[in-house]
């Protein structure tokens, strides 16, 4: 299959990096017909990018950039391709691949369209299997041009943190990941009417429950054990302002930001406060 005319800088630099790894040059010079500058909206044509030690060192006209490149630099000429800086996805679930059930099946359950697929992933897949799924989806995200992804829940206990660390260590390809660990929720959110014999064990594999301000702080600290980059909380009308404030206060005390899932006017205003 031919490459599309618009390709991302992330995609091309990854290909260049893989090719360069075979001969181990210190620098790679990538040339293309044009490069989009999102700060101005203008296109530089023609364009070149100099990469040294895995990082972009210089972007500009080919004659200028090539003049600054080491003589041993590997040259990758992409012809008529267009380069685009790596994209950032602020809302991803890299360890979850939900297939929405048929409408008739949705009507027979209490958990809507999203939750049956989520429940199947949590109860029907081992943590190792989910991380392997995450590795595949992370690679696909990178090859689609996303060089950074903020993963906001639905990764099991520590799946996104483990995937982030594997990518950072160079074990698997993928974007830079900001991991949030387990999502903080009120009891009864997402999963409902589960078999009581296994309900607690299933929920704990995916969420941290909030029952009061003290438990909100404990939930944040539980995620800290896995070195998360941010905290994700689902704020429905069943979480109090005191509970939400405790989440934010504890997270900020640990130098972490908080991402909030809020859909109703009351929950949105509560997250703002």
Image (spheres, grey):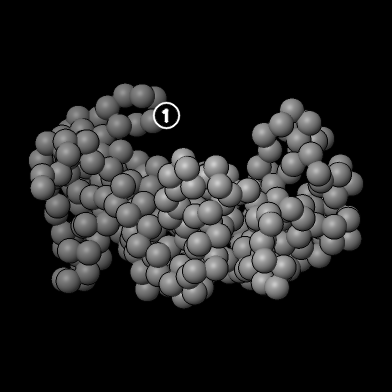
Whether residue 97 sits left or right of residue 210 in the image: it is left
Q: Residue at x 10, y 44 (%)?
A: 2
In this view, the residue in front, 228 or 101, is 101
- Residue 226 can be seen, yes or no: yes
- Residue 218 drawn at (x, y percent): 81, 65
**Residue 231 seen in this snapshot:** no
- Residue closest to the eye, 39 or 218: 218
Q: Position of residue 250 (x, y in %)?
A: 81, 56
**What is the crowding at mark 1: few (fewer than 14 residues within 10 Å), some, or many (at least 20)?**
few
Number of numbered discs overlaid on the protein picture: 1
Residue at 85%, 50% (x, y): give it. 243
Seen from the viewer's position, the closer of residues 131 and 171 is 131
Residue 20 in picture, x, y percent from top left: 19, 64
On screen, residue 213 versus residue 78, left or right, reads right
Tag 1 secondary structure: loop
Q: Which residue is the site of mark 1? A: 39
């Amino acid at each position: 299959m031919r490459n599309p005319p618009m390709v991302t800088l992330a995609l091309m630099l990854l290909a260049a990096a893989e090719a360069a790894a075979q001969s181990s040059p210190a620098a790679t010079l990538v040339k293309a017909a044009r490069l989009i500058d999102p700060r101005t909206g203008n296109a530089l044509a023609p364009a070149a990018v100099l990469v040294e030690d895995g990082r972009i060192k210089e972007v500009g006209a080919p004659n200028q950039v090539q003049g600054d490149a080491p003589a041993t630099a590997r040259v990758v000429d992409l012809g008529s391709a267009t380069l685009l800086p790596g994209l950032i996805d602020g809302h991803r679930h890299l360890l979850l691949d939900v297939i929405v059930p048929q409408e008739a099946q949705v009507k027979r359950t209490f958990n809507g369209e999203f939750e049956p697929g989520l429940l199947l992933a949590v109860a029907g897949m081992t943590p190792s299997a989910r991380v392997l799924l995450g590795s595949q989806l992370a690679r696909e995200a990178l090859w689609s041009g996303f060089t950074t992804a903020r993963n906001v829940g639905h990764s099991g206990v520590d799946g996104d943190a483990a995937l982030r660390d594997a990518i950072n260590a160079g074990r698997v390809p993928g974007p830079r990941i900001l991991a949030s660990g387990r999502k903080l929720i009120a009891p009864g959110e997402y999963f409902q009417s589960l078999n009581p014999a296994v309900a607690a064990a299933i929920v704990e594999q995916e969420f941290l429950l909030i029952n009061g301000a003290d438990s909100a702080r404990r939930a944040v600290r539980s995620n800290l054990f896995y070195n998360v980059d941010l905290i994700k909380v689902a704020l429905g009308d069943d979480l109090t302002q005191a509970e939400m404030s405790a989440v934010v206060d504890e997270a900020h005390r640990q130098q972490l930001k908080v991402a909030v899932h809020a859909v109703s006017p009351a929950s949105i205003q509560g997250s703002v406060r």
